[in-house]
């Protein structure tokens, strides 16, 4: 099948790169022919990606739709966002199969999705909360898996940094109002941020595996830590992107929302390695996204 991939987020950081690599590797292994690189997800992100040498955003064209049998939208950056809706609506109107994958899903939904969501060929969510919301909004046959970055293979990089069991700081989400204040508490800690086009997924995960603790506000930073089996401390986001993982696993890990709670969570993480091992074991038992099999629907 000829599949057009929409919302290629690779230039953002290595976690997004891992997602896209997994999508493409899975589909190619199933014999599909791919075309992609269509970025279209918001003013801030599009400016960021243009600065980093990515492909400028644009809508799906008639030529794109004439070529493909299906459109697959990577749900990163907001699965229910307008740009993804427009891409899937155009594909559905053209009689193409439609797939939305690796997405979170909000509790409240734009009205335009109410007609489109039930007719999508397949919807894949990142966790239990998103799945519950999506099914309540009319999705048919939606499924939940871990974020695709987790399933991307990690090789043996020629280079990585050995932190010798030290504790690391990554960074917090750009739009956290308390970002500078929160980060000030970790001045002097060794750092391992997710720097696009510099720090690859293999390097990132392998380096994390040499640490004893990773503090990060990044969703993909958490997934990399889990892949490396390194305990982590995170910070409460404005959406349920991180809670999707905790809710799905049923394993309770602190989710701080203040500077005080963040410091308490660091102390808790140092004392509760066994709880993290439970989470890592559960994640390793989870089945990956199955890809696209002809005749799904």
Image (spheres, rainbow, N blue to C red):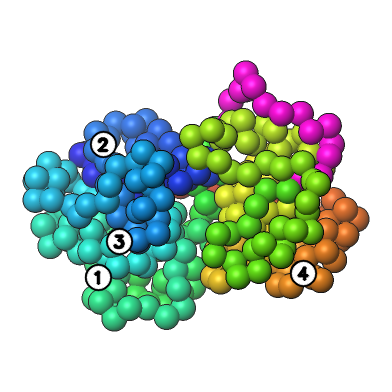
Q: Name the foreground residue: 250 vs 209.
A: 209
Dominant secondary structure of the residues highlighted in magenta in the image:
loop
Give how far apart the Cα atoms at labels 4 and 3 are. Answer: 35 Å
- Which numbered disc, 4 or 3, marks the residue that appears first in the sequence? 3
Answer with the quarter of the image where residue 143 lies. Answer: bottom left
- Which numbered disc, 4 or 2, marks the residue that appears first in the sequence? 2
Q: Give the class, few, some or many, for how many residues have Cα within 10 Å of label 1's Cα (few <14, many ≥20).
A: some
Q: Are marks 4 and 1 in contact (CB under 8 Å)?
A: no
Residue 26 in view in this figure = no
Q: Which part of the image, by quadrant, shows the N terminus? A: top left
Give how far apart the Cα atoms at labels 2 and 3 are. Answer: 18 Å
Q: Is residue 236 magenta?
A: no
Mark 1 or 3: in front is 3
Q: Is residue 167 magenta?
A: yes
- Which numbered disc, 4 or 1, marks the residue that appears first in the sequence? 1
Give how far apart the Cα atoms at labels 2 and 1 are. Answer: 24 Å
Q: Considering only vertical position in the picture, is 92 above or below 227?
A: below
Mark 4 or 2: in front is 4
- What is the number of the mark on residue 34? 2
Tag 1 residue: 116
Element at label 1: helix
Q: Residue at x 70, y 72 (%)?
A: 257
Q: Give the residues drawn in magenta, as a range.
A: 154-168
Tag 3 residue: 84
Q: Give the class, few, some or many, for how many residues have Cα within 10 Å of label 2's Cα (few <14, many ≥20).
A: some
Q: Position of residue 278 (x, y in %)?
A: 76, 52
Q: Position of residue 192 (x, y in %)?
A: 68, 41
Element at label 2: strand
Give how far apart the Cα atoms at labels 4 and 2 are. Answer: 45 Å
Give how far apart the Cα atoms at labels 4 and 1 are. Answer: 41 Å
How many numbered marks does the figure carry? 4
């Amino acid at each position: 099948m000829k599949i057009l991939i929409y919302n290629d987020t690779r230039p953002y950081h290595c976690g997004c790169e891992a997602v896209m690599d997994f999508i493409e590797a899975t589909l190619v292994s199933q014999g599909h022919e791919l075309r992609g690189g269509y970025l279209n997800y918001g003013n801030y992100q599009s400016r960021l990606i243009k600065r980093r040498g990515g492909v400028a955003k644009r809508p799906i064209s008639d030529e794109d739709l004439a070529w493909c049998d299906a459109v697959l939208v990577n749900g990163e950056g907001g699965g229910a966002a307008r740009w993804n809706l427009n891409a899937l609506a155009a594909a559905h109107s053209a009689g193409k199969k439609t797939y939305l994958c690796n997405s979170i899903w909000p509790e409240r939904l734009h009205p335009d999705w109410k007609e489109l969501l039930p007719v999508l060929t397949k919807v894949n969510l990142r966790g239990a909360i998103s799945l519950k919301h999506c099914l309540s909004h009319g999705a048919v046959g939606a499924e939940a898996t871990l974020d695709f970055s987790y399933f991307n293979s990690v090789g043996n990089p020629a280079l990585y940094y050995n932190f010798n069991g030290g504790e690391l700081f990554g960074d917090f989400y750009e739009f956290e109002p308390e970002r500078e204040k929160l980060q000030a508490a970790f001045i002097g800690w060794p750092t391992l941020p997710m720097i696009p086009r510099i720090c690859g997924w293999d390097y990132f995960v392998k380096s994390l595996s040499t640490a004893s603790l990773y503090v990060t506000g990044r969703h993909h930073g958490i997934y990399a830590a889990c892949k490396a089996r390194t305990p982590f401390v995170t910070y409460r986001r404005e959406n349920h992107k991180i809670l999707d993982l905790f809710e799905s696993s049923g394993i309770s890990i602190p989710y701080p929302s203040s500077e005080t709670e963040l410091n308490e969570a660091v102390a808790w993480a140092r004392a509760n390695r066994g709880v993290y091992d439970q989470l890592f074991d559960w994640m390793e038992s989870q089945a990956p996204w199955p890809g696209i099999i002809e005749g799904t629907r």
